């Protein structure tokens, strides 16, 4: 009886648990379950892009070219007389002024030649003095018929001969003085001395082609470059208005080296290349331009005023023409066809297709399509036009 009663009690307990688990959920649990099942899916993340704002600006018109730097003046200093190089009173790389002595060739032989020419002139002048006195004396005697006419003509001819000799002596003196001056090689202009190729003690000759040293003027300095012939009208118009500004930049375009002015263009177009050479000058105060250096040149020939601009990377090329992605206020993009007036590689001038103040995508277009949602990662500041 006790074992049977115990079994009956267990059955009652199990039946109650089953009924409890099958009972309907409470209102709070039901509401939580309903809320969880009806929660919306999270919005997908936008494509990260960089954007820029369409702005109005004055955009300079630059003509770009590759230029070669050359000295404003350059000379190779050679000897004009034969002799021993006795002195080089300047050091290599020294800045010199016009008239400074750069090299000295032994002047003693040429000083001796000058002294001999001066002595010869003094001798002839003394003989002329005697001959002139004879002419005066024999003229008076000839009038009194004391001396023959023939003797008078002889002394007159001797006087003329001595006067001619003195003229020749003056020429010899000038030549000797000139040769003596050639013993002192001086700077013909302000500049910088190059590397010396002949050391003191060596014999130099006027006929030799080897220069003792070079001298180059670097302040100011020149840059020559070639531009396509189609740019000639713009260059001519800019030169008619004044001296166009020219900017020299490093070969990697990261540094501005100097600003100068356009000096002139060549007098003929190269028929082989269809280009014309031009020359610009730069003050070069910091010696950032050096002869033989290659630089990027920009010539300012005009300005497009108050035009719509976007960074050049914003403009994309499609099968139907040029387009940009415009970012809408809801952070989706629309593909807008544009008409571009000009692009200098950094700033694009838009003639039609966008409006001032709109945002356009400048980086990340490869993952976009019309209507796509974007997440603005960075906002680029439009580059200064013409920089």
Image (cartoon, grey):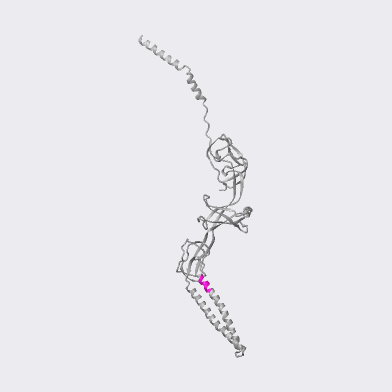
Measured from the top left, where is residue 19 in percent x and y? 45, 15
Which quarter of the picture shows residue 236?
Answer: bottom right
Q: Is residue 336 above or below residue 155?
A: above
Give the residue drawn at x 50%, y 76%: 115
In reply to whether residue 353 is colored magenta, the answer given is: no
Which quadrant is home to the N terminus?
Answer: top left
Give the residue drawn at x 52%, y 79%: 122
In reply to whether residue 176 is colored magenta, the answer given is: yes
Q: Is residue 26 above or below residue 332?
A: above
Give the residue drawn at x 57%, y 85%: 134
Q: Residue furthest top?
A: 1
Q: Which residues are magenta?
A: 175-181
Q: Residue furthest left?
A: 2
Measured from the top left, where is residue 177 in percent x and y? 52, 73
Q: Is residue 208 above or below residue 363?
A: below
Measured from the top left, where is residue 104 in percent x and y? 48, 68
Measured from the top left, where is residue 287 in percent x and y? 50, 56
Count of picture labels:
0
Q: Residue furthest bottom?
A: 146
Q: Taken as a whole, is the magenta stretch helix, strand or loop?
A: helix
């Amino acid at each position: 009886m006790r074992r049977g009663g115990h079994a009956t009690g267990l059955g009652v307990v199990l039946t109650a648990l089953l009924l409890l688990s099958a009972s309907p959920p409470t209102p709070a649990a039901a509401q939580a379950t309903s809320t969880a099942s009806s929660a919306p899916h999270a919005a997908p993340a936008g494509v990260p892009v960089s954007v820029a704002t369409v702005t109005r600006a004055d955009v300079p018109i630059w003509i770009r070219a590759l230029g070669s730097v050359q000295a404003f003046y350059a000379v190779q200093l050679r000897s004009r007389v034969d002799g021993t190089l006795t002195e080089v009173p300047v050091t290599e790389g020294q800045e010199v002024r016009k008239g400074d002595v750069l090299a000295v060739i032994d002047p003693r032989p040429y000083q001796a030649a000058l002294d001999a020419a001066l002595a010869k002139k003094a001798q002839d002048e003394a003989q002329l003095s005697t001959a002139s006195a004879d002419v005066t004396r024999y003229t008076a005697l000839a009038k009194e018929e004391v001396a023959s006419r023939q003797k008078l003509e002889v002394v007159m001819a001797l006087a003329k001969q001595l006067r001619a000799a003195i003229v020749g002596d003056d020429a010899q003196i000038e030549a000797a003085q000139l040769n003596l001056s050639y013993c002192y090689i001086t700077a013909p202009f302000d500049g910088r001395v190059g590397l010396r190729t002949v050391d003191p003690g060596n014999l130099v000759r006027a006929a030799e082609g080897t220069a003792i040293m070079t001298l180059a003027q670097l302040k100011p300095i020149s840059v020559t470059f070639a531009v396509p012939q189609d740019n000639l009208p713009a260059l001519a118009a800019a030169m008619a208005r004044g001296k166009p500004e020219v900017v020299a930049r490093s070969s990697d375009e990261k540094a501005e080296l100097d600003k100068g002015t356009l000096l002139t263009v060549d007098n003929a177009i190269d028929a082989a290349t269809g280009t014309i050479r031009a020359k610009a000058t730069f003050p070069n105060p910091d010696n950032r331009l050096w002869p033989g250096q290659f630089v990027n040149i920009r010539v300012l020939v005009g300005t497009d005023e108050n035009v719509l601009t976007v960074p050049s990377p914003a403009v994309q090329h499609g099968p139907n023409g040029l387009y940009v992605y415009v970012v809408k206020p809801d952070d989706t993009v629309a593909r807008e066809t544009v008409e571009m007036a000009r692009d200098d590689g950094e700033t694009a001038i838009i003639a039609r297709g966008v409006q001032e103040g709109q945002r356009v995508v400048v980086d990340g277009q490869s993952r976009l399509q019309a209507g796509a949602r974007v997440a603005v990662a960075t906002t680029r500041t439009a580059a200064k036009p013409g920089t």
